[in-house]
């Protein structure tokens, strides 16, 4: 009888039906003890076994639907019948089935069972699966956010390296179809001062003026180099040209101060300023 059914399943070429038979007591591998579980087994090729299994669970589903429809029809029932139904409803059942589509989604091609497709155990496992999936999705989102943060940090480091070397490193992360950005190398403005800038006992005032002139001469060279840098926007180029012109003017003023002091001390003036006039030599 269907109410005695425990499970229907197939494994490769094996089809088995497990039923409860109170008249028979056997040793069950599932309970590791004595139980009334009896297993009936048949063997055939895999496709035939699976077809038999599908027909069997469909027939069982028909039985469950028919039983449910009968329960909805009001009829005069004895107390014994009501007590029997309540007893059956209170005991755990593993013969509940879902629709055939749901079964096919849960069952592998090589194996399937009644429990794995529609029992309370499967419902519990589905809830656990949903919780696990939600937890994994949260972890995935956190990892993706952390990965994006690290990628942005790597981009900044690669851009800084490219500004110093003039070449974009191969570690720069690129998306699908993305071209590496064009980076302009920074122009170095470092220079070395002469060794004779140290103050001497000959004339400290003149020595200070000479040192100041040499320092500003290096600043003018750096300003000219920055103003001559290619691929500048109009505003930046104009600003750097103005800075270069101001540096040249300041250098000329320092040279004039040196010559005035030399004339005052009875010395011959010099012409050290050999730089181009502001605006000349700058593309």
Image (tube, rainbow, N blue to C red):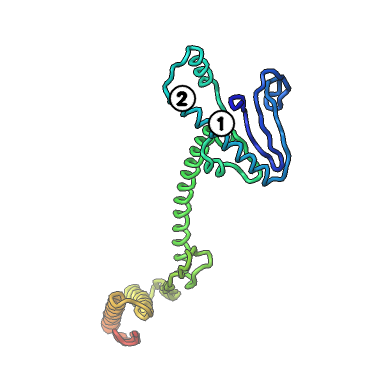
Does 142 sit above or below residue 74? below
Quadrant of the drawing holding the C terminus: bottom left
Is residue 45 or residue 30 the one in the foreground?
45
The image position of residue 150, as x and y in percent, is 47, 55
Left or right position of 277 against 163: left
Residue drawn at x 45%, y 48% is 141
The image position of residue 84, as x and y in percent, is 52, 16
Residue under pointer 1: 121
Residue drawn at x 31%, y 78% is 237
Is residue 275 or residue 179 the one in the foreground?
179
The image position of residue 67, as x and y in percent, is 50, 27
Pointers 2 and 1 in contact (C-beta within 8 Å): no
Quarter of the image for residue 26 reads: top right
Quarter of the image for residue 34 reads: top right
Q: Which of labels 2 and 1 is toward the front?
A: 2
Task: For residue 257, say whether it is visible.
Answer: no
Quadrant of the drawing holding the N terminus: top right
The image position of residue 257, as x and y in percent, is 27, 79
* Furthest-top residue in this view: 79
Q: Using the numbered discs, state the Cα–Cα distance from disc 2 to disc 1 in whole angstroms.
A: 25 Å
Does 55 sit above or below residue 165? above
Quarter of the image for residue 220 reads: bottom left
Local crowd size for mark 2, using a 10 Å CA cut-off: few (<14), some (14–19), many (≥20)? few
Upstream in the sequence, badge 2 or badge 1? 2
Is residue 220 or residue 126 the one in the foreground?
126
Is residue 196 or residue 34 the one in the foreground?
34
* Furthest-front residue in this view: 76
Task: For residue 179, say whether it is visible.
Answer: yes
Left or right position of 166 against 40: left
Mark 1 lies on a secondary structure that is helix
Does 201 sit above or below residue 118? below
Residue under pointer 2: 71
């Amino acid at each position: 009888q269907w109410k005695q059914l425990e499970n229907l399943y197939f494994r490769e070429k094996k089809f088995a039906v497990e039923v409860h038979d109170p008249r028979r007591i056997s040793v069950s591998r599932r309970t590791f003890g004595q139980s009334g579980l009896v297993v009936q087994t048949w063997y055939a090729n895999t496709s035939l076994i699976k077809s038999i299994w599908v027909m069997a669970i469909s027939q069982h589903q028909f039985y469950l639907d028919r039983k449910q429809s009968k329960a909805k029809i009001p009829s005069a029932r004895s107390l014994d019948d009501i007590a029997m139904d309540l007893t059956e409803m209170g005991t755990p059942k593993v013969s509940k089935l879902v629709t055939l589509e749901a079964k096919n989604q849960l069952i592998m091609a090589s194996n399937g069972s009644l429990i794995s497709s529609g029992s309370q155990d499967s419902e519990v496992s589905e809830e656990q699966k949903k919780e696990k999936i939600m937890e994994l999705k949260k972890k995935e989102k956190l990892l993706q956010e952390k990965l994006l943060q690290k990628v942005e940090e790597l981009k900044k480091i690669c851009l800084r390296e490219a500004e110093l070397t003039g070449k974009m490193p191969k570690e720069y992360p690129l998306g699908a179809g993305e071209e590496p950005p064009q980076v302009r190398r920074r122009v170095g403005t470092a220079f070395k001062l002469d060794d004779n800038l140290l103050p001497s006992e000959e004339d400290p005032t003149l020595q200070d003026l000479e040192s100041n002139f040499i320092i500003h001469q290096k600043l003018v060279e750096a300003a000219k180099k920055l103003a001559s840098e290619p691929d500048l926007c109009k505003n930046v180029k104009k600003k750097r040209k103005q800075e270069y012109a101001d540096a040249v003017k300041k250098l000329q003023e320092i040279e004039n101060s040196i010559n005035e002091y030399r004339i005052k001390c009875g010395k011959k003036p010099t012409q050290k300023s050999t730089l181009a006039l502001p605006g000349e030599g700058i593309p």
